[in-house]
Image: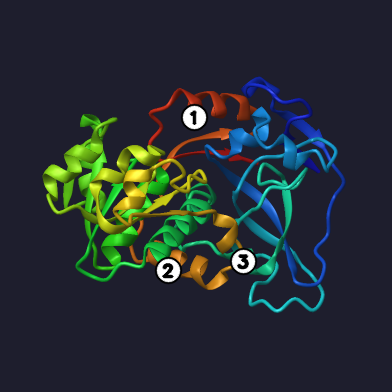
């Protein structure tokens, strides 16, 4: 079975094909013949050594990838699922050693796999699970009521875009940032107010909402730099583990930080299936920036790290 991964950490060029033993589904599992895997910023951490301490328990290759779409080709004995061989599916993947979405075949917990949205091809379906669930988790931990206001940084990105759309579906008012070329995109995603992105985006959000927003989802990874946009007692969801350490001004105002890690929702099948339904209903938009053959994973990582990608790059198998 072919996977794309690394034996030695490095730049995009470190990614290459490997052959690993075929796996079979056991109890509680399904096997998916993967046709598409989205490329996310977190994938670079598997490749560049940022997760080396966690990975050293396993031998290489280390295989990235948290989003997959394909076809069920095996259901483990006794598995409680309505999925059957031949179903088109999408899945969220928690990478571990040689287990990652950049694979021809994946064995996954049945709770991590749902049918793909009808009308979506494999590439489009692969863009939804990880970022969609992370966006859902961010909104859930912030726990806002309809009519309250959330700000979103990095709103043109995959995570940020899903937060905008899901927040609107939840009845929230959305203030979002955008570069000039992305203003129309972010407005079309549903943002009520669009402000210029940048290091001082907190000031611009405050100009739009003088009392401060009720909460903020920080897709741009600005961390403490955005806390000034949030009202006293509000909350901030972060995506790279920042917990507010060192932001004494926010602590004094009762602003709380909520690091969100998708592993918490990796087996929340009902939430993933709700995202499928919302994609079918047009509530969320599946955005594919470009597809590349799996062997071109190094180029996909180069494009991702160069910045400016809107939607997701997707590897095809």
Mark nearer the viewer, 3 or 2: 3
Q: Is residue 199 left or right of residue 302?
A: left
What is the C-alpha distance between the residues marked 3 and 2?
Answer: 17 Å
Q: CA distance from mark 1 to mark 3?
A: 27 Å
Disc 1 or disc 3, which is closer to the eye?
Answer: 3
Label 3: which residue? 267
Confirm or deny contact between disc 1 and disc 3 (CB under 8 A): no
Residue 17: quarter of image: top right
Q: Position of residue 63 (x, y in %)?
A: 71, 39
**Could you say where residue 141 lies in the image, as x and y percent from the top left?**
42, 64
**Label 2 secondary element:** helix
Local crowd size for mark 3, using a 10 Å CA cut-off: few (<14), some (14–19), many (≥20)? some
- The answer to whether 71 is drawn above or below residue 47 in the figure is below
**Which element type, helix, strand or loop, lies under badge 3?**
loop
Q: Residues within 10 Å of mark 2 (few under 14, many from 20)?
A: some
**Residue appearing at x 35%, y 66% in the figure:** 281
**Residue 277 marker:** 2
Q: Position of residue 67 (x, y in %)?
A: 58, 50
Name which of mark 1 and mark 2 comes first in the sequence: 2
Q: Mark 3 vs mark 2: which is more N-terminal?
A: 3
Q: Does dot 1 land on a helix, a strand or a loop? A: helix
**Residue 304: which numbered mark, if any?**
1
């Amino acid at each position: 079975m072919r996977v794309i991964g690394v034996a030695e950490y490095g730049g995009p060029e470190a990614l290459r094909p490997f052959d690993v033993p075929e796996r079979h589904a056991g109890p509680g599992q399904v096997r998916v013949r993967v046709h598409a895997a989205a490329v996310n910023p977190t994938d670079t951490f598997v490749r560049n050594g940022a997760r080396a301490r966690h990975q050293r328990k396993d031998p290489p290759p280390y295989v990235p990838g948290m989003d997959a779409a394909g076809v069920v080709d095996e259901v483990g004995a006794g598995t409680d699922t309505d999925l059957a061989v031949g179903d088109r599916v999408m899945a969220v993947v928690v990478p571990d050693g040689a287990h990652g979405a950049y694979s021809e075949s994946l064995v996954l917990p049945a709770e991590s796999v749902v049918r793909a949205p009808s009308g979506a091809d494999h590439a489009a379906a692969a863009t939804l699970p990880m970022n969609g669930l992370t966006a859902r988790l961010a909104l859930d931990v912030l726990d806002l009521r309809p009519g309250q206001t959330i700000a979103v940084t990095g709103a043109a990105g995959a995570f940020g875009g899903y937060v905008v759309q899901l927040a609107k579906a939840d009845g929230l008012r959305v203030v979002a940032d955008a570069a000039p070329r992305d203003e129309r995109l972010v407005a079309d995603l549903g943002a009520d107010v669009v402000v210029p992105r940048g290091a001082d985006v907190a000031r611009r959000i405050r100009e739009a909402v003088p009392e401060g927003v009720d909460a903020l989802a920080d897709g741009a990874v600005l961390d403490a730099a955005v806390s000034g946009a949030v009202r006293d007692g509000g909350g901030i969801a972060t995506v790279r583990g920042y917990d507010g350490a060192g932001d004494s001004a926010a602590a004094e105002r009762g602003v709380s930080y909520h690091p969100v890690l998708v592993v918490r929702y990796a087996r929340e099948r009902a939430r993933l299936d709700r995202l499928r339904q919302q994609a079918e209903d047009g509530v969320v938009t599946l955005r594919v920036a470009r597809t590349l053959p799996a062997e071109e994973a190094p180029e996909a990582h180069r494009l991702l790290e160069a910045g400016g990608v809107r939607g997701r790059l997707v590897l095809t198998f």
